[in-house]
Amino acid sequence: MLCLSVVTMTTEVGSETEVKKDSEQLGPDKAKDKPEEASETPENQKSKEASSEEAQDSSLPEPTSQSSPSSQKKQKASPESKGISRFLPPWLKKQKSYTLAEPKDEPKKKATGEEQVIEESESQTPEGVAQPRKSLEEAAENHHNAKADDKEKQSVSSAETPQLVKEDGKEMEVEKVAEKKEENEEEKEKRETKEVQTAEIKTDDIPQKSPKKIKTVQCKVMLLDGTEYSCDLEKRAKGQVLFDKVCEHLNLLEKDYFGLLFYETSEQKNWLDPSKEIKRQIRSLPWIFTFNVKFYPPDPSQLTEDITRYFLCLQLRQDIVSGRLPCSFVTHALLGSYTLQAELGDHDPEEHRRDYISEFQFAPNQTQEMEEKVAELHKTHRGLTPAQADSQFLENAKRLSMYGVDLHHAKDSEGVDIMLGVCANGLLIYKDRLRINRFAWPKILKISYKRSNFYIKVRPAELEQFESTIGFKLPNHRAAKRLWKVCVEHHTFFRLVSPEQPPKAKFLTLGSKFRYSGRTQAQTRQASNLIDRPAPYFERTSSKRVSRSLDGAPMGISDQSLRDFSATGGQAAGDKIIDTEAAGQANLKEGGREDGSPVKTPQLELTQDGKINSLRVDGENIYVRHSNLMLEDLDKTQDDLLKHQASISELKRNFMESTPEPRPNEWEKRRITPLSLQTQGKKGDHIFQVKTLPGKEKQWIAMPWIDGAKPEETDKSLEEEITSILFSKEGFGASTRGPFAAASPGPAEGAAGEQTGASAAAAPPPQRHASRAEGPCTGVSNADKSSHETLDIVEEKKQAEFGIEETVVVDETNKGKMQVATDAGETCKVEHLSKKDSSSLPSDSSSSSSSSESEDEEVGEYQPHHRAIEEVIREEQEEEEDMKRKEHEEKIQHVEATPEGSKLNVPVEHTQVTAEDLVQKNTVTVATEEKKLSEEVKQDLGQEKEEEQLKLNGDVSHVDIDVAPQLICCSEPPVVKTEMVTISDATQRTEISTKEIPIVQTETKTITYESSQLDGSAGGDAGMLVSAQTITSESVSTTTTTHITKMVKGGVSETRIEKRIVITGDADIDHDEALAQAIKEAKEQHPDMSVTRVVVHKETEIAEEDEE
Amino acid sequence: MAGLGGGPAAFGRCTHAVVRALPESLCRQALRRSAGPEVDFARAEREHQLYVGVLRGKLGLQVLELPADESLPDCVFVEDVAVVCEETALLTRPGAPSRRKEVEAMKRVLESLNLNIVEMVDENATLDGGDVLFTGREFFVGLSRRTNQRGAEILADTFKDYAVSTVPVHDSLHLKGFCSMAGPNLIAIGSSEAAQKALKTMQQMSDHRYDKLTVPDDAAANCMYLNIPSKGHVLLHRAPEEYPESAKVFEKLKDHMLIPIANTELEKVDGSLTCCAVLINKASEL
């Protein structure tokens, strides 16, 4: 029997546009706020609007602080922040004042002359001169603020507008709608808020209206070419400020590969965290940093700009000379010859005498012989341009085995000295010079540290059943943490599509919340594709390089001018206002942080160009990861932004479709989806879910919490269902969830108790599975382990499942990579786990507590596989929405939480019921189904909650149990076995079956298609359910259920249509055709909507078998 | 010329081969892991001559043949005493004390080729070239009875461009007793448990993904791949008379010029195809 269920979810977001994202990007602070909110307030979803508003509001100090509880983090950081606006130093306000209080400020500016001129003049002018302005500005600000408030309020009142809906989008949309000036103002306001945040501390120090000077600290940065860059930084400036200054100085756009190092001791180097205040990272006073490559691109030829390659070359030359990058004699000579070619050009016998080479150092131990060889090879490079020579240099250097390997001293469990090398592909273990082991990122499930120990939890190898945790002893706690952070960063940068959300801080949580907050390689590549500037000129003479000329501006200029400039520039720009604004904002941000400290003029220029990459200032948040995407766009003009967004969405799509590297993430996502599908599948339907997801990212973050919260609110049964639903529906969500759970204790709390119990119960069965030879299944074995592990496992399993399923559907190579180890059976388990989830989740949460780190940082955990999380999250939101809907609709489904009965035969009757239910369910789809199942199933053995995955769709006579493993364990005789897995894995799956009884085997295939395009922040938040209707039609063999839901989120109305189409027939039905038709119809019916998600679940009755 | 061997494309290139005649003492005194049938010296010599003939005649290599030394019964297995990669040669310190003097002759001949020579002088180090598998991208060094960690370290120090990963070897004299490179990205591997286990280890240790060619017989997995400009991929493998099933596997390699070589006699003393030659790619002078 074939059941095709097509669920089409379409979401229309009113006026939301990707632009919103931009706005978010522009305002990292907002992003921060959001995440924070999420973490703090479970209601975040709902509050998203608020948050977005808040973000805007935040610009308005008072309202923000008071109105939005969620914004508290800032407050946390500094309690005083609430009143910040008042206390804001004049300079901070200036920006606003300029923009906002155009009249006042402008006159000043005008008086000086053109804006730019003014800026320059300002920059040149001593602070003292500037101060008066500030005071004026302040006065103006007050007015402005008042105005701003009004405006904001208006905007808020007009909540209908998309702004609210998407955090990111808010501003943008508003801006569009509103006059440019207003936009500017708003932005400025935002900026202000942001600035305020950054400057909060400052505020404290500084009396309200007194124009005190900000304390500044002189920074020195050693550049790769050996020159030194120095500047004054405001004492409380964050690392990003300095980093961006340096990059500007270097005229470097592809800066995500780089970072700033500082040395605690001669040996201990630390990366300056851009999201934290410098002074909190570097204790001793001379602030001296080294500009270095942080992430060595595995393929330098993919860098966009020659200047980036040049810096990479400089870094590698240092690495080579210092011995960090060992080379053979021949390679030394070859690389040296390319260096000569790049630096000196063609060999000139006249000019290049014997000793010309001696000025250069090519190797730690340079010999006469080597120099001769270098000279010899140099002659052969005739005609290579410097850029070509650099490229050749890199092509050879990248093949060196230690290229990009960051080594850390450690001892193994037996006290033997080893080195741990972190690189793009994973973790390498060296003993002396020998590689004795290697753990590729996909193989690592968790990275953690505790005191001076560093742990990795590794996926079980083939033929192994259990995960293993490997511990290393680092010299000290700091070293362990440093290694952990480097691992987190490398994993995120090289393996994830987008940075992972930092774990939410919960009370009682321990450990570091650190997460990489910059752009990932995928993102930076995407971004750098948009770089559109003539190749910047730069001098290569390493010894003489002077980049100042590029900037053309003196080093130290008061930022005020900058701010003013940017602001004015924005206004003046007219059309380009947005761009400029963006740039301005960036500047502003920088400036804000820098306030009081001199700012480089160069930034201004850059900003004008719009090419400057705005700093994705994370503010202090480590949490801001979502903002990254948004932030990326800051530098760019609208067009760029749009392109960028588009490209991002494309990127995602690509990932979804075929991109090799990123896939894993997506796979995970998919896997997750599959889970949902599976649940559905159990029911026996092919479900196509088309969802348009509005920018969900940020909101999503909040989601997990919400989920957790909701369950608590609702009945336990609901909880379970929900959780299960989330997992299943979310598809992504499930997998993500796990991570989330781990990351965020919140959700776990509610369920924790239950989950733990459940997990415990479940644990035994899994082992059985494991025995089957499924390595991944370890879950069971894991049971012994901490709850955390369970969660992790679950995720993994899910992934595995996905992989399998997808494999079936799609051919995927990835599968092999990622989850080869995982078994289908496990996956099933996973699902169950997830469903059980509440229990499992809780366990996770508990684990999460351990994982999520408090600031003690004594402990840190990081689960590498979460990647896809964001997307997942989105789905989750949607799902959540679904959930809500469900709730609204009625909880018919509430059936029971007792889903455990794994074994039920689902009566055919249900099918019809399902159809009906489906209608309602459709929105909820999975969940409802599950519920139904659960109802039916109630009888079950059910030790566990695994719910009912059995579903009958239309005809399906057999119920499948994905959960099989657990079920098996717990349940008694008659079991219906579901084959989630397709072909490849099927075998394993089958094995899973229960021993006891005749099983009806059903082959279920679930395919999920999801359009990634909608990156926007999603409407994901709660929103209001305006209307929901369900339409059911039935044709001969097709049952179509349509569910329409209108939600108002943050002022944006979103219409979501889910269609579930159940096609029943014999095996000869052409699924593909049916599916295509269904999608086509859906599109035709709703031309203005986009298909977000298609889930296909195919269930085929294979035969009855006994358990294997 | 170029560093790092010019990349994988150049893998297997070679211009010279160093071989050594077999001494009569081999029949009775050569080291062997287990007692077995006696070596038929005449036949062994014939097979060896055939082997050298292929290298010299058929493949056009410059073959440098060292004379046999009766005091060194294992001297025909030149691979164990030198590891040559690009312009650098590491003279090993063979695990079997009786073989250490084999290095001297090898040193002389390699010096004559103007290679950068590195000698393993550490008395705690042992390394047999038969434990060294160079894939074109990295080295795998089998830790066996003949090769120890220190030897591997010295190898790593010698060939710094490449990752050197260690692979525990059991149930075989050498790592290459059950595996070898059969192409630029292709590892020939035996079917025994030990071989498969070693392969797994190698796969885990490598950032690169190799194709594998699994042959039923471990001994047959030792084949000799060369990349000869005029011939393309050339593979010397064990003759069908010896290992018919494995030969069938090799015959599936359509892109390779396959040359079956019998090695029945030397195999009795743990000799393999790769054992009997050191291949050198001597770049034309700049």
Image (tube, coloured by chain):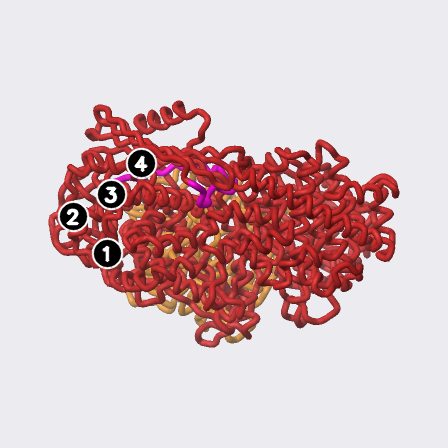
Chain colours: A red, B orange
Q: What residue would you read off at disc 2? A: A904
Q: CA distance from mark 1 to mark 2?
A: 14 Å
Q: What is the chain letter for disc 1? A: A
Number of residue marks: 4
- Side (left or right) of A254 relative to A788: right
Residue B204 in sight from this viewpoint: yes
Q: Residues within 10 Å of mark 2 (few under 14, many from 20)?
A: many
Q: What is the chain letter for disc 3? A: A
Q: Nearer the viewer, mark 1 or mark 2?
A: 2
The quarter holding residue B38 reads bottom left
- Is label 3 on the same chain as label 4? yes
Amino acid at circle 3: Lys
Image coordinates of residue B52 in percent, x first then y, are 45, 50
Q: CA distance from mark 3 to mark 4?
A: 11 Å
Amino acid at circle 4: Ile
Q: Secondary structure at mark 4?
A: loop
Q: Nearer the viewer, mark 1 or mark 4?
A: 4
Q: Residue at x 44, y 24 (%)?
A: A1087
Q: Secondary structure at mark 1?
A: helix
Q: Are marks 1 and 3 in contact (CB under 8 Å)?
A: no
Q: Which mark is residue A241?
A: none
Q: What residue would you read off at disc 4? A: A687
Q: Which stretch did the figure color magenta?
A: A1004-1024
- Sequence-first tag of 3 and 4: 3
The quarter holding residue A4 reads top left
Image coordinates of residue B217 in percent, x first then y, are 31, 53
- Sequence-first tag of 3 and 2: 3
- Sequence-first tag of 1 and 4: 4
Q: Secondary structure at mark 2?
A: loop
Residue A371 in sight from this viewpoint: no
Q: Residue at x 33, y 45 (%)?
A: A887
